[in-house]
Amino acid sequence: MTDAFRIMKPGPYTTVQDAGRYGFQQFGIPPTGVLDQFAYRAANILIGNPEHAAVLETTVIGPQLEILSTTDIAVTGAEAPITLNTEPQRGWSTFRARPGDILNIGPVKNGCRCYVAVTGGIDVPLVMGSRSCYVAARIGGYEGRLLAKGDVLKRLEGRLLSQMRQVPEQAIPVYSPDINLRAVPGPQNDFFDEGMELFYRSGFTVSINANRMGYRLEGPQILQKNEMPKSIISEPSLPGGVQVPPDGQPIILLVEQTVGGYTKIATVISADLPLVAQAKPGDQIRFVKVDLADAYAAARYEEDNLRNLLFRAD
């Protein structure tokens, strides 16, 4: 392992994350991991890392880092100003940094979260098979917490690139404040009648209560059938489930949930979860009704995009 960088300014919510921690929900440990799987995997593909390598996930404002060893870096996800020693760098591309260089990622312009990959991947202890940080339980990541000024992170060994790479412009996601999310009805769609119609034809606003656990939305009240109970027997929660609590304001569940007892009116398809990850309070969301065949087709399309990213030398 090699020292990778020192945190000079951490940003408001910067953590170490990887593909996630699976198989422990029955013990109250959620999957955690990155919120935007597409941007995360693309960053590692650019660098030439294994796709499960650990990265930094930043929120709204990125960190300032002092580079401690020669490494290639890729920053994907939200559009934000990126500088290396005051020289602007492109997002969704690689660049080489050397000891003493200063990397700065500023406030986002579009989107919400950036992903910072380095050669070899960030090296923190594996906890239950993952390097992801679960802040609420203080496990994983760097000492189970948000990064702070003065922290020194290491990286695993990896091979530097023979030439720099970038994702073609047409393959870079566009993050808009007006978001359409494809969602399959259910699993408790039978609890709703007029509420289901209202859910799919209405717009909702992302509230300030939007985090890695889930995004609470504000909009028209989605009501269940009168004869139905307001909750169900608690069952496992999965990212993308859209809960409707008694107040009728939907919540899109994300990666830091285990079980829940509210009815789920719909499920956002996996291919659109990165759009949720990149949404900010005040953004507008509409749900588009699709079926399982559409969801599978979208997942295959996203996987093809990742597998067929065409890079070109800078």
Image (cartoon, rainbow, N blue to C red):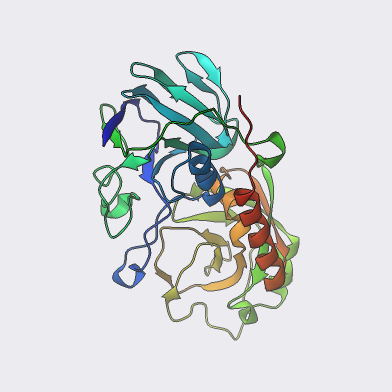
* Residue 199 visible at all: no
| Quarter of the figure with the N terminus | top left
Position of residue 193 in the picture relative to residue 106 (left or right) = right
Residue 310, horizontal then vertical, whole percent? 65, 40
- The residue at the far front in this view is 162
Q: Answer with the quarter of the image where residue 153 lies.
A: top left
Position of residue 154 in the picture relative to residue 284 (left or right) = left
Residue 175 vs 270, above or below: the answer is: above
- Count how many numbered circles sit on residues in the image: 0
Residue at 56% over, 68% down: 244
Residue 70, horizontal then vertical, whole percent? 37, 24
Residue 112 vs 244, above or below: the answer is: above
Q: Which of 240 and 296 is in front in this view?
A: 296
| Quarter of the figure with the C terminus | top right
- The residue at the far top in this view is 86
Residue 304, horizontal then vertical, whole percent? 65, 54
Position of residue 261 in the picture relative to residue 91 (left or right) = left
Q: Nearer the viewer, residue 66 or 246?
A: 66
Residue 57, horizontal then vertical, whole percent? 43, 41
* Residue 127 visible at all: yes
